[in-house]
Amino acid sequence: MLPVRGGDGRKLTVWGIRTTWSTVADGEFFCPGCGGDRNYRRRTGRRRFAVLGVPLLPRGTAGPVVECQACKERFDTDVLDHLTTTRFSAMLRDAVHTVTLAVLTAGGTASRSALEAAVTAVRGAGFQDCTEEQLEAVVDALATDEGRLGLYDGPECCGAALSIELHEALEPLAPHLAGPGRASLLLQGARIALADGPYIPAEREVLATVGAALHMGADEVTRLLSAVRAP
Ligand SMILES: [Zn+2]
């Protein structure tokens, strides 16, 4: 806008573009401006050519933009691609739980040390109430179910349903994890597998699926798996 001074010294705007914003949606996002989970408003604007503050001619639309309700800063809508801290934590917790169940299903629940390692991993991820009995019951149910549905080709083969579960839990998370985060998730699974002795082929297969779902290279997965020590 072009500002001039009015007779009383007040700044007047003679002409320029005025944008009026209206809210089309709201929700929660991670605000890169003030750094945390915040409420946002998704807004679109109507631009008008205004003379002396009076909107006259339409000049198209502006936005859409995402406006933080805390710091009022506006961002492009791709800011919504980032996960909120709450959502990220929940996805990570579910990922650890799924990896743990998959490794246990592949390796069996006969070993106390594998179950202990599994409970430690799942509790560490945020499911404080998890017990060995619970994990054992879920894994037994999974094994029975998959056997009944014929999803296992043999005892040494990773179940197809398990593989789908792993991809569903891990793939959406992969773009939001840096290298060490992906490795850490894989290594948690590896430690459970190693708790009752060296990897068996079914465990290796599950861990390879974990690596693939996390978009890790096969070579990197092999290198990490051979470097990890039993707990
Ligand atoms: Zn903000």
Image (cartoon, rainbow, N blue to C red):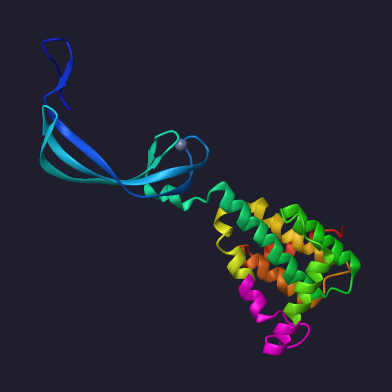
Seen at 71% across and 61% down, the residue is 186
Seen at 18% across and 17% down, the residue is 11
Is residue 11 depicted above or below 46 in this figure?
above
Left or right: residue 159 versus residue 113 is left
Left or right: residue 72 versus residue 15 is right
Picture coordinates of residue 183, whole percent (x, y): 69, 56
**In this view, which residue lies farthest toward the top?**
8
Which portion, as a residue range, is magenta? 144-165
Residue 208 lies within the magenta run = no
Residue 155 lies within the magenta run = yes
Is residue 52 depicted above or below 59 in this figure?
above
Count all numbered tags in the image, as a single digit: 0
Picture coordinates of residue 44, whole percent (x, y): 28, 47
Report the front residue among 32 and 126. 126
Picture coordinates of residue 52, whole percent (x, y): 11, 27
Seen at 79% across and 71% down, the residue is 104
